Amino acid sequence: MSNALWNPTTVGEISLPHRLAMAPMTRNRSTPNGVPTELNAEYYAQRASQALIITEGTQPNADGQGYLLTPGIYSEEHIAGWRKVTDAVHKADGRIVIQLMHAGRMSHPDNTPHHRQPVAPSPVQPAGEMFTLSGPQEMLVPRELSTEEVATTVDDFRRAAAAAIAAGADGVEIHGANGYLVHQFLATNTNQRTDRYGGSVDNRIRFVVEIATAVADEIGASRTGLRISPGNPFNDIAESDTHDLYPALVRALAPLDLAYLHIGNHSGDDELLHTLRKLWPNTLVLNRAGTDIATRAKDIEDGIADVVTVGTMALANPDLVERIRTGAPLNTPDPATVYGGGEAGYTDYPTHIA
């Protein structure tokens, strides 16, 4: 295995002992009102040998919840719950950032505490169904956020970032990928607005730039990251101008001096990936899903990435770092338990005994 993977580095003000980090993965194990539990704390602490843990998507406000049993970070209860998690990770000598994720139109009233209609840049119904306690439900036409509500949502991200730091997190990652609210503002099929947040590339990137600016001003740019997924069609997203949109976005973000840019699910467009690498001045984190560790390590060797993230492998192997270092075999994840409640498929994967 490449020595490059094990070289220490610094991401903003966060010192990492190596360059293999844990990708954010929705896990659906918090309480119905979004409070992380002891089970969450155990899960993340088990994986503290990862260079950096990026948590599951965490809603910055009540409208941001999309799925059942996902955590929030906008109340004192949420802060107290997350404090259990961050304390456990830090006790195990780990580092953790909380991912701020607003689901936007990828939601359903049955999954939220207020049972309101989902919100989005425009009233465009997504394809597919949403899983709820009563079973799969047809996705709904979301309500369009007013211009004033967009500004309020930006402020909600700012306050959520402050709450994450109050909860002991080392930083936050803004989720701008995978078809959720920020990505919905970027994509032309989900953003049909005629105000300052819609139409041109400059207008469609405005929302995420405003969020990144607000969060960086609140907690410091050196503790702020952003995740994007250019061209990723997940959650019924269609992007036809990625080679214009994402370079413009990265150019607009570069002066903010954020800790890192996390690129995931980029649809195999390595030409765009190399362009963004050249434009981004700070740490670039890359998730090349579906590839082995050697392939990801080569991205570090080649200078394409500074840090790489792994998802499913980290889920099924709490001691993934130790297994890779020693050449031990890897556990196989159990797909049937990935999103279920309880310990199965969450904290019960065995560690390696040499």
Image (tube, rainbow, N blue to C red):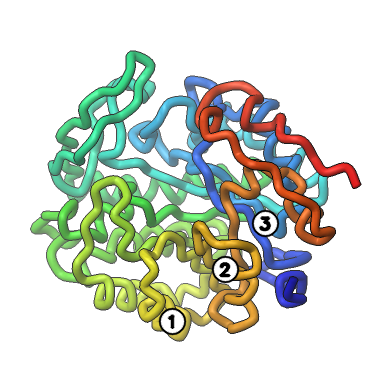
**From mark 3 to mark 1, how far is it between C-alphas?**
24 Å
Q: Which mark is residue 188?
A: none
Q: Which mark is residue 274?
A: 1
Q: Position of residue 220 (x, y in %)?
A: 57, 63
Residue 84 in view, yes or no: no
Residue 198 in view, yes or no: yes
Secondary element under disc 3, as helix, strand or loop, is loop
3 vs 1, front mark: 1
Labels 2 and 1: the sequence-earlier one = 2
Residue 97 or residue 284, whichever sits in front: 284
Q: Position of residue 349 (x, y in %)?
A: 71, 34
Where is 202 relative to 210, above or below? below
How many marks can you see? 3
Labels 3 and 2: the sequence-earlier one = 3
Residue 241 or residue 153, whichever sits in front: 241
Secondary element under disc 1, as helix, strand or loop, is helix
3 vs 2, front mark: 3
Q: What residue does disc 3 label?
A: 52
